[in-house]
Image (cartoon, helix red, strand yellow):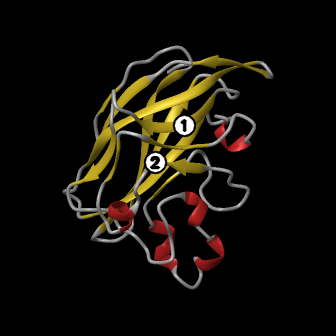
Amino acid sequence: MKLIVQNIILASLTTSAMSDFVGLSLEFQQVDENLFTMRLYADFTASTDQLNAVFGDSQSSLYIRSDNGFYQNPFGGPTSVSINTALFGIFPSLAYDSWVTIGSEDQVDNQMLDIGIDWIGFESGGDIETNNGTWFATPDDMQVVAGSDLRVLIGQFTTYGSDSEIYGSINLQGKQGVGCRLQPQLY
């Protein structure tokens, strides 16, 4: 396995391309005059490559911060496992809730787990921080595979104001795909 510490800043990324992991990419959407949503992806070179975990440890903490805080819908949760798309019609703003994931956008067939992360601050609009925690899915879960678009979704972050920056440091763990077999890799 390869280990990469990746710094993210709203519009500028510092990346080190290694093996099958080629960096992070962002998608932006302006929700209204006050809310802006960013989706963060890990990018790969093969459709069979995997992202298995996002973590922080004593050597390299994980943190994701926003200057103006994160939008949190009361019907959402800190991870995509809490997102019920059946509620979007009743609570349209739920679609913009801030959450983290490994690949899946909602609770359908979502096998993601987390351990060691205190979500209380994030669910109150604050930061995600840990030096001993992770969110992850196992290599057998299809949501970890890069697929035809060669990327795996890491999270959706909605913030207030066009001047707000989202920034942080994340650590990624995954596997390099080779044909139908997967070779363990650190990135």
Q: Is residue 106 above or below residue 115?
A: below
Give the percent coordinates (x, y) of residue 145. Answer: 67, 35
> Horizontally, is 85 left or right of 78 in the view?
right
Give the residue displayed 37% in from the left and 27% down from the top.
5
Q: Nearer the viewer, residue 61 or 132?
A: 132
Q: Nearer the viewer, residue 115 or 185?
A: 115
Give the residue displayed 47% in from the left and 61% down from the top.
78
> Horizontally, is 100 left or right of 62 in the view?
right
> Horizontally, is 71 left or right of 109 in the view?
left
Give the percent coordinates (x, y) of residue 116. Answer: 46, 48
Give the percent coordinates (x, y) of residue 178. Answer: 73, 17
Give the residue displayed 32% in from the left and 44% down from the top.
63
Question: Regarding mark 1 in the picture, which secondary structure is present there?
Answer: strand
Question: Regarding mark 2 in the picture, which secondary structure is present there?
Answer: loop
Which amino acid, by three-letter code, is at mark 1? Ala
* Residue 9 in view here: no
Separation of residues labelled 2 and 1 (CA atoms): 13 Å
* First-in-chain label (2 vs 1): 1
- Residue 144 - label: none
Closer mark to the observer between disc 2 and disc 1: 2
Q: Residues within 10 Å of mark 1 (few under 14, many from 20)?
A: many
Which amino acid, by three-letter code, is at mark 2? Gly
* Residue 6 in view here: yes
Give the percent coordinates (x, y) of residue 144. Answer: 65, 38
Q: Is residue 155 above or below residue 1?
A: below
Which residue is at the far bottom? Answer: 90
Q: Which residue is mark 2?
A: 116
- Residue 53 - label: 1
Q: Residues within 10 Å of mark 2 (few under 14, many from 20)?
A: few
